[in-house]
Image: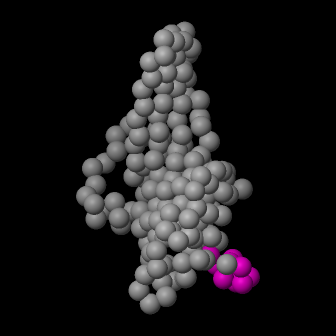
Amino acid sequence: MKIALFLPVLLAASCSAVQPELSSLEMQELQARVLDSDKRTVFNASVSVLQDAGYVVRNADFDTGLITAAGETQNNTSLFGILASTTSSIQTTASVFVEPWEFHDTRIRVSFVEAYRSSGQYGQSTSSDSTIFTADVYRNFYQQLDKAIFVRNGTGGR
C-alpha cells in the first residue's frame, strides 16, 4: 500500500520538464530534517521506508550513515523510438545520509535523482541525471519515515 502512495508522486515528478533553480540552502531545506530519535532508529527506518517504496538498497553503511538505493527501471521507449530502433528508460535512485546531531537528535538528508538512459541501434548511447526538487516527493518520504520511526519506538524495534 505504501508503494501505491509513494511511487505516483515520483512518477508525477518525472513529468515535470523544468526543474527550479534552488540555492544550496533551499535544497537543504527541502531535503534535510532533524529528527528527535537516535541514529540507529532513523537509519533502520530509512532503509525500511525505501524498501517499502520498491527501492532495492544497494549500500547501507551505518558507520558512515550512507544509504543508496535504486528504484525500478521504467521503459520509456516511444513508438517513434521503436521504429528508429532506439530504447530509453528512466530510473529513480535515492541517497540518504544519516548523522548524529545535537543532544540526542539525528539529522537526515535524502536526495532523489532520475537517471535517463537511451541507446540506439548502432551502439550509441546517452545518459543524463536530474535531481528531483518536487516538495511532495520529500514530504511523502518524511511522512513515511515519521511513521516508521514511531512504530520502531513504540515496539522497541531499532
Picture quadrant of residue 28: bottom left
Locate residue 129 relative to residue 77 in the image: left or right.
left
In this rendering, would 66 be left or right of 149? left
The colour scheme used here is one colour
Q: Is residue 133 visible?
A: yes
- Image coordinates of residue 141 in percent, x first then y, are 54, 61
Q: Which residues are magenta?
A: 149-157
How many discs appear? 0
Residue that appears at 57% across and 56% down: 59
Could you say where residue 78 lies in the image, as x and y percent from the top left? Answer: 54, 20
Using the rendered view, name the quadrant where residue 79 is placed: top right
21 on left or right of 101: left
Residue 86 lies in the magenta stretch: no
Residue 66 falls left or right of residue 8: left
**Dominant SS type (magenta):** helix
Q: Position of residue 90 (x, y in %)?
A: 52, 35
In the displayed structure, would residue 38 be above or below residue 70? below
User: Above or below — where is 64 with respect to 10?
Assistant: below
Q: Is residue 102 above or below residue 93?
A: below
Which residue is at 42% across, 52% downward?
Answer: 134
| Nearer to the camera, 11 or 38 | 38
Q: Quadrant of the N terminus?
A: bottom right
Name the outermost residue toward the front: 63
Residue 137 visible here: no
User: Where the C terminus falls, by quadrant?
Assistant: bottom right
From the top left corner, tell me how far across and down residue 61 is, in percent: 56, 65
16 or 156, nearer to the observer: 156
Outermost residue on the top side: it is 83
